[in-house]
Image (cartoon, grey):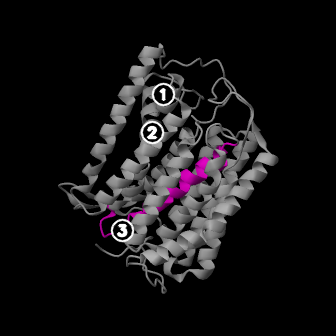
């Protein structure tokens, strides 16, 4: 297994233990060190509850009482504090300064756009333009897929297509996580499990920057999740969901350097497969039915499961279970040959198809259909 080089550029001068697995004692000490970040996130979330941005329920909402939103500000500030400390103190996780600053600036930019969206409900076109700009910041710092391993073909150079794929992935993941943030605890718990798994994989393979960034994300959402469990006292809002999706997308590109084969880019999509499948399935279904994709609705698989009578806690728990299963697949994935790695998604796909089948069975029993009253134009928690 080759050493991790997160950006595809030459390693920073002081990589230290990057490229080698970290002793358990160091990992445990790092877990204790991130506790202040958990506290920062929790304090900010409590402040957002006390001085709230209110989310008034409408025909597209899963909740029925006015609830604060914008709780994602807590994880965002915790992550930024962690990254600034990392930049000053932790040489082992340093990457080139341009990439490091670029990641922080892009994170701040996407979180700012999300917060403005929570405050003023920005148009879909403006949100996409801002997401594109943030993605270009990441790409401009060198976080780009340049080649990938294809079974039967070996390593394929992507050229310009690599840049386009990177931008599409970052924007797609950002929106997919945002779309899925419509049920108490579902996205927050999934992110915690996914980032814990990513941090563990990065620690084992010496990926200092990815390890630290994943830990900071995990810490931020650990501080947020207790306030978001059913019945939620606050929602993360676009500031949290867009930020989380964006940062995980960027880390996916960075994780493509776990070895010389960039097929390891699939690690983060695999960890988030439950969220990505539901978002992709819903968009495809709505496109085939000729529905306006920008209109709000309540027909994601997780929403239909809840509407058919599956308790909110159970639906969230099912997605947490998906994340745990996918974490196991990600660990298995690392040890496979380049030709075998793309097929590791088949078990994940089979589980998601089974879940979709179960939800549709429950829909039939409950007399539900995919059709949604399009006359109501109020914007719900996700697309």
Label 3 to label 2: alpha-carbon separation: 29 Å
Residue 3 position in % (x across, y down): 35, 76
**SS label for mark 1:** helix
241 is within the stretch colored magenta: yes
Question: Taking the image as drawn, is residue 157 in sight?
Answer: no
Q: Nearer the viewer, mark 3 or mark 2?
A: 2
Label 2 to label 1: alpha-carbon separation: 11 Å
Residue 300 shown left or right of residue 349 in the figure: right
Using the rendered view, name the quadrant where residue 24 is placed. Answer: bottom left
Residue 101 position in % (x across, y down): 60, 71
Magenta-colored span: 234-263
Residue at (48, 27) in percent of width and height: 305
Q: Are marks 1 and 3 in contact (CB under 8 Å)?
A: no
Residue 63 shown left or right of residue 257 in the figure: right
Examine the rendered structure and indicate whether residue 279 appears above or below residue 23.
above
Residue 261 shown left or right of residue 52 in the figure: left
Q: Which residue is mark 3?
A: 258
Number of the label disc, if any, that sits on residue 101: none
Residue 298 position in % (x across, y down): 56, 27
Q: Are marks 2 and 1 in contact (CB under 8 Å)?
A: yes
Q: Which residue is mark 2?
A: 318
The outermost residue toward the left is: 152
Residue at (28, 72) in percent of width and height: 1
Residue at (47, 27) in percent of width and height: 286
Label 1 to label 3: alpha-carbon separation: 37 Å
Question: Taking the image as drawn, is residue 124 in sight?
Answer: yes
Q: Nearer the viewer, mark 2 or mark 1?
A: 2
Q: Which residue is mark 1?
A: 305
Using the rendered view, name the quadrant where residue 255 is placed. Answer: bottom left
**SS label for mark 3:** loop
């Amino acid at each position: 297994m080759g050493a991790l080089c997160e950006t595809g550029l030459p390693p920073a001068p002081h990589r230290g233990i990057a490229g080698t697995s970290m002793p358990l004692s160091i990992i445990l000490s790092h877990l204790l060190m991130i506790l202040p970040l958990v506290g920062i996130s929790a304090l900010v979330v409590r402040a957002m509850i006390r001085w709230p941005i209110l989310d008034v329920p409408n025909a597209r909402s899963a909740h029925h009482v006015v609830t604060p939103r914008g709780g994602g500000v807590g994880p965002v500030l915790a992550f930024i504090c962690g990254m600034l400390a990392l930049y000053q103190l932790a040489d082992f996780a340093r990457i080139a300064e341009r990439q490091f600053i670029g990641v922080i600036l892009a994170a701040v930019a996407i979180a700012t756009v999300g917060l403005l969206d929570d405050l003023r409900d920005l148009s879909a076109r403006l949100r996409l333009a801002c997401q594109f700009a943030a993605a270009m910041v990441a790409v401009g710092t060198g976080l780009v897929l340049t080649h990938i391993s294809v079974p039967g073909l070996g390593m394929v150079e992507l050229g310009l297509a690599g840049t386009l794929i990177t931008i599409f992935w970052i924007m797609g993941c950002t929106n997919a996580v945002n779309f899925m943030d419509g049920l108490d605890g579902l996205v927050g718990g999934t992110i915690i499990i996914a980032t814990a798994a990513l941090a563990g994989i990065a620690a084992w393979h010496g990926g200092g920057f990815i390890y630290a960034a994943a830990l900071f994300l995990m810490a931020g959402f650990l501080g947020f999740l207790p306030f978001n469990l059913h019945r939620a006292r606050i929602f993360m809002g676009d500031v949290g969901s867009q930020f989380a999706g964006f940062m995980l997308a960027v880390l996916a590109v960075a994780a493509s350097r776990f070895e010389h084969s960039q097929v390891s880019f699939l690690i983060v999509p695999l960890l988030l497969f439950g969220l990505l499948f539901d978002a992709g399935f819903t968009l495809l279904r709505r496109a085939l039915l000729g529905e306006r994709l920008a209109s709000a609705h309540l027909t994601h698989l997780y929403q239909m499961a809840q509407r058919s009578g599956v308790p909110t806690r159970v639906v969230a728990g099912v997605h947490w279970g998906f994340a745990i299963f996918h974490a196991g697949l990600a660990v298995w994935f690392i040890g496979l040959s380049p030709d075998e790695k793309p097929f590791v998604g088949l078990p994940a796909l089979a589980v998601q198809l089974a879940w979709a089948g179960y939800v549709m069975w429950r829909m039939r029993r409950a007399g539900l259909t995919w059709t949604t009253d399009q006359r109501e134009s109020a914007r719900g928690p996700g697309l």
